[in-house]
Amino acid sequence: MAAMRRVVGALQGKRMLVAAGVLLLLCIPICTLTPLEGAGSLSLAEALKAHLGTTCPWPEVAITDIAVNDQVPDTAPAKIVVDGNPPGRIPFTAEFADGKRITGTAFVRAYDRVVMSTRPNRKGYVMRDDDVYTALMDVTRIPKGALKDTGAVVGKPLSRPVSPNAPILDAMVRERPLVKRGHRVTLLAEAASFSITTYGELKSDSTVGGHVKVLNLQSKKIVSGLLVDENTVKVDF
């Protein structure tokens, strides 16, 4: 019986501890984050954006869904401290000139520039200035190998076809091959109403995309033109 009384006493003691813990939790105020709106939201978002603009490598960021633990003054904070690495939801602390400190979280989207194709082009085509443009893209959506500088594309031949308004990847372009003097090429002269081809021979080494002089093997005259690929020269006239 004594053993039974000890077991019952232990169970009652545990129940009392659990009940006391629940009461204690009910008495402690819970710190919650609430969505921020109004002038305070605007000034805080601008301050966060300015801070991230100096610490992040991207040309553009967007701040949304700010939630804070206290009322925010209408004035901009004197200091921002960010924990974690954007993009995504990050915690931060804002310190104001009067000494007030606000903690909260914000969702950060980051954007970077990528090279996009203006129009569809075939494999082997040498890209020109008007074939590309740059656009901002969410960094979480940028494909691996996307090029950021048009200089890495212009003047180089495509290693595969490209679609319009699509990112240009490093695997889509290749270095301009050197075409040796004496190489036989097709001479192409074309306009809106006609197209003429014949055969020629390069008079000097050149790379695809460069202007060259070519011996017309039929007329024996030297003509100049653009080496549009390793085997074709578009004649100037």
Image (cartoon, rainbow, N blue to C red):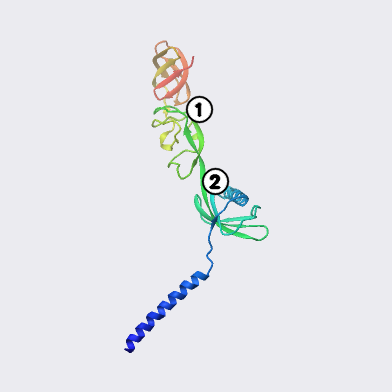
Q: Nearer the viewer, mark 1 or mark 2?
A: 2
Q: Amino acid at mark 1?
A: Asp
Q: Residue at left 51%, top 28%?
A: 129
Three-letter amino acid code at the position of disc 2: Ala
Please state the horizontal and vertical placement of residue 23, each as a whole percent of the image.
Answer: 48, 73
Badge 2 is on which residue?
62
65 versus 222 height, above or below? below
| Crowdedness near tag 1: few (<14), some (14–19) or many (≥20) residues, C-alpha within 10 Å | few
Label 2: how many Cα within 10 Å (few below 14, some 14–19, many 20+): some
Residue at (54, 63) in percent of width and height:
31
Q: Quadrant of residue 193?
A: top left
Residue 49 location, x and y as percent? 58, 48
The residue nearer to you, when weighing 95 against 127, is 95
Q: Identify the image quadrant of the N terminus.
A: bottom left
Q: Position of residue 97 (x, y in %)?
A: 67, 57
Residue drawn at point x = 44 percent, y = 77 percent: 17
CA gap, disc 1 and disc 2: 30 Å
Q: Number of numbered discs present?
A: 2
* Left or right for 227, reference 40: left
**Residue furthest to the right:** 98
As displayed, is residue 145 above or below residue 157? below
> 55 left or right of 164?
right
Task: Reply above or below: 87 against 169.
Answer: below
- Seen at 41% across and 37% down, the residue is 171
Question: Seen from this angle, which residue lies furthest bottom?
Answer: 2
SS label for mark 1: helix
**How far from the left and from the top, in percent, is residue 95?**
62, 58
Q: Toward the viewer: 18 or 74?
A: 18
Residue, disc 1: 130
Would residue 94 appear left or right of 167 to someone viewing this image?
Answer: right
